[in-house]
Amino acid sequence: MKKYISLFLITALTFSLVGCSPNQSQVQKEFDSFVLKDLKESVEDDYSTYHIYFENPEKYGFEKENVDIDFGEVFNDENYDDIREKIDEFQKELSQFDRDLLNETQQDIYDQMTFDLSVAKEYSDEKFEYMYNYFEPMKGVHYSFESFFADFKMRNEEDVKDYIQLMKSFKPYINDILEYTKIQADKGLMRIDFEEVLDRVDNILKLKDQSSILKQALTHIEELKLSDQKTKDYQKQVKDVFVESYLGAMKNIKKTLNELKTQKNNKEGLAKLKNGKEYYEILYKKAMGNDRSVEDMKKLLNNYAKEAFMKMMKIQMDNPTVYEDIRKMETKYTDYKSILKDLNESIKNDFPSFGDIDYNIKSLSKDLANPGIAAYFNIPALDSTQPREMFVNANKYEDSPSSGNTKSISTFQTVAHEGIPGHMYQYDHYYRSQESNWLKLQGNLGFVEGYATYVETQVLNYLSDEISQDVLDYYNYESIYINCIVALFDIAIHYDGLSHDEAMDFLKQNGLAASEELYQQIQANPVAFIPYYAGYVEIMELRKKAESELGNKFNALDFHKALLKTGSVCYDIIEKDIQDYIDETK
């Protein structure tokens, strides 16, 4: 839903100008004005950003009358040229500033803008038109809008009106996506897992007005404590527009995709398409937030997989029962809140402390639960005063307690990933410690998810009092090994161009089951796992560098302070922060 030309450029209103020459001072003031002007235009051009990231947008100078309450435009022949033109205009404006005359924070912003623009420029090349897939598994429109409407914050009566208007705009927006998909099919670029999409759509349609989306909206309206008549009127409007627009859109998806089933549908990787390998490289760069080549990451992933495998074998030689021990190990935890409470205490020697976090843990309704997601953290508004929200998919594990009940290590890691010291902690840290509002709102997935995956490996140490170190280490290395192979599987399909059968052989040769489900998920959703697993590798490379150069002066707490210093930005900036930490510690 985010336009990639909207960079969400926010910066602090003022910067320290102490020690600046008159010319330098002027340049910095002009840069601030440039960023703030773009912020206003970007936020007012995208209602989702306006509503989700700001509880009180008027305090930031945003004007509601300038905001269209809809989901923006779908890529098409009419706006591709406009997008390219806007990218060029922004690039020209940015290039007018001399980076050397900016202060340190502004240089970080400048570098992030430069990286974002380079990705946007490559991504918008006309040879990649109609390659984007709106119906990707796990995060396509048939899933993402469920979360959007279910999690929509109704803070006041005005938000109820906005919700109704957004719901009205949903069917026309989906119709535009379907027109885009028809053109995509005509060009031979369609990559849709029809069974996955249509199953999800059918489930929504079967529920009709019993959907949790509608139930939650009606509950939110009641919680506003409006007059009885207003409450009744708004609830009726919401119910009517849900049936007409939301369910109507699902019917249109079902009808159109059933018609498109007869057309060419690519069931192999992007490398099989014209310009597909190049497109994958751009998706990879966009997902990771750095310029490391796919080839270089392949080498790193292979090295990490081999290293993890050798360590597993050594543990098994020393302790032949370790594999069996893993399958029956359990933690002491019987609920999610206890896990978070203990983690919040345990991390204090390893991660910077900034006080307690107020949060709620909620279970997803069964009809809203994405089978590919165990839990997720709802990113809060920049100025939010409400408790943080973490949603858990208890339904995902109800038939497999050994892999996901509250006593399993998997659940412990998931809660750490989404909660503390993962995403919940990560965002609270940025919001409290980072002075630049612009940097608070950056979201480089390769760092956001790479960090949270890294956290999963670190928190295992906090279980050593109840589970043997051999078991924890073996479990950790096994997870790292599998993660690396999955990331390599993604690259093999979309970059190396392995056929379906070759891809299945790739999994078998690396000791994994030949999973058709995994193949279909990755084939229709390239780079889905890359930010998690390649991102983990990038962070481990930074840690290894710090440990190597500092020796016994290395300290995990100080390393994590440096790692989290600037926020979820591109890796060039994060590498600079780590190098500063190394230089200062030496």
Image (cartoon, grey):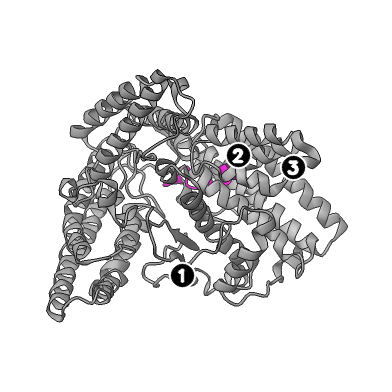
Identify which amino acid the numbered label 1 is placed on.
Asn
* The magenta stretch spans residue 161: no
**Residue at the image point whose x is 40% and y is 20% from the top:** 22
Asked which secondary structure carries label 2, the reply is helix
Identify which amino acid the numbered label 3 is placed on.
Phe
Is residue 436 visible from the viewing direction of this image? yes
Mark 3 = which residue? 554
- Residue 538 marker: 2
* The magenta stretch spans residue 535: yes
Asked which secondary structure carries label 3, the reply is loop
Asked which secondary structure carries label 1, the reply is strand
Mark 3 surroundings: few (<14), some (14-19) or many (≥20) residues within 10 A:
some
Magenta stretch in the rendered image: 523-536
Q: Position of residue 72 (x, y in %)?
A: 22, 45
Is residue 271 visible from the viewing direction of this image? no
Count of numbered circles on the image:
3
Residue placed farthest to the right in the image? 318
| Disc 1 to disc 2, C-alpha distance | 31 Å
Q: Position of residue 447 (x, y in %)?
A: 53, 43
* Pointers 1 and 3 in contact (C-beta within 8 Å): no
Mark 1 = which residue? 360
**Mark 1 vs 2, N-terminal side:** 1
**Residue at the image point whose x is 38% and y is 52% from the top:** 193
Q: Quadrant of the C terminus?
A: top right
Q: Position of residue 489 (x, y in %)?
A: 56, 43
Question: Relative to the observer, which residue lies in front, 250 or 100?
Answer: 100
